Image (tube, rainbow, N blue to C red):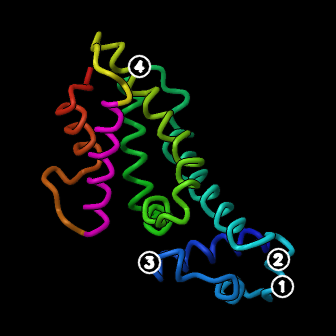
């Protein structure tokens, strides 16, 4: 694994372990990545640049998992369903990365907006396509915010080990879309 990749992986691991970006240092990241502290500065000008690269990488991984595999799906309902399922599978399979996406504190909130909002925009587009197919006049942004809130809640509950009725991912996503009137 290349040094830059090890540094990002190490940053993600430390953020998850310590629960906050504020508790992570360049020295700790270097130690975890098994490189000298000066080696970090060959790749990143400062801590903020490394945090930005870490956020960009985590959002890219999430975006690829949630949106990369559904581009070929034409039916808007099937596309939204597949994206919801992919979201929950990613959160379950990559809990560390998922936690970094949504638990970095205020220091990186601008980065979350920079890297996360384009991913959210894709959800708004998918919801808008479903609303249009359903001849539903609701505002796509508001409905997408509800979808995100629900699916994020389901993911969080799954990660904490709480059992929900209809525990299969497909069933949970289908039920959510039925309740939000987003089914075909």
Sequence-earlier tag: 4 or 1: 1
Query: Between marks 2 and 1, how big is the CA–CA gap?
Result: 5 Å
Find residue 38 and name its label: 1
Sequence-earlier tag: 2 or 3: 3
Q: Which residue is mark 2?
A: 41
Query: Between marks 3 and 4, how big is the CA–CA gap?
Result: 37 Å
Q: Is residue 127 above or below residue 176?
A: above
Sequence-earlier tag: 1 or 3: 3
Q: Which residue is mark 3?
A: 19
Q: From the viewer's side, name the closer residue of 117 and 92.
A: 117
Q: Secondary structure at mark 1?
A: helix
Q: Is residue 43 left or right of residue 145?
A: right
Q: Are marks 2 and 3 in contact (CB under 8 Å)?
A: no
Mark whose residue sits in front, 2 or 4: 2
Q: Secondary structure at mark 3?
A: loop
Q: Give, as a single range, the part of the protein colored magenta.
A: 142-160
Q: Is residue 3 above or below residue 74?
A: below
The overriding secondary structure of the stretch rendered in magenta is helix
Sequence-earlier tag: 2 or 4: 2
Q: Position of residue 13 (x, y in %)?
A: 55, 77
Q: Which residue is mark 4?
A: 129
Quadrant of the drawing holding the N terminus: bottom right
Query: What residue is shown at x 48% (from left), y 76% (from top)?
Result: 20
């Amino acid at each position: 694994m290349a040094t830059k990749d090890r540094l990002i992986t190490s940053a993600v691991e430390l953020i998850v372990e310590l629960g906050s970006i504020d508790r992570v240092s360049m020295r700790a990241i270097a130690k975890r990545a098994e490189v000298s502290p000066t080696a970090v500065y060959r790749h990143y000008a400062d801590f903020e640049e490394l945090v930005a690269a870490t956020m960009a990488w985590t959002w890219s991984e999430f975006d690829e998992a949630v949106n990369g595999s559904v581009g070929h799906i034409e039916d808007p309902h099937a596309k939204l369903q597949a994206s919801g399922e992919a979201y929950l599978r990613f959160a379950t399979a990559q809990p560390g990365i998922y936690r970094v996406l949504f638990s970095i504190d205020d220091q990186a909130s601008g980065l979350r907006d920079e890297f996360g909002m384009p991913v959210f925009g894709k959800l708004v587009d998918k919801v808008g396509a479903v609303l249009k197919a359903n001849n539903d006049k609701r505002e796509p942004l508001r409905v997408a915010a509800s979808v995100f809130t629900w699916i994020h809640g389901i993911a969080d509950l799954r990660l904490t080990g709480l059992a929900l009725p209809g525990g299969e991912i497909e069933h949970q996503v289908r039920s959510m879309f039925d309740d939000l009137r987003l089914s075909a």
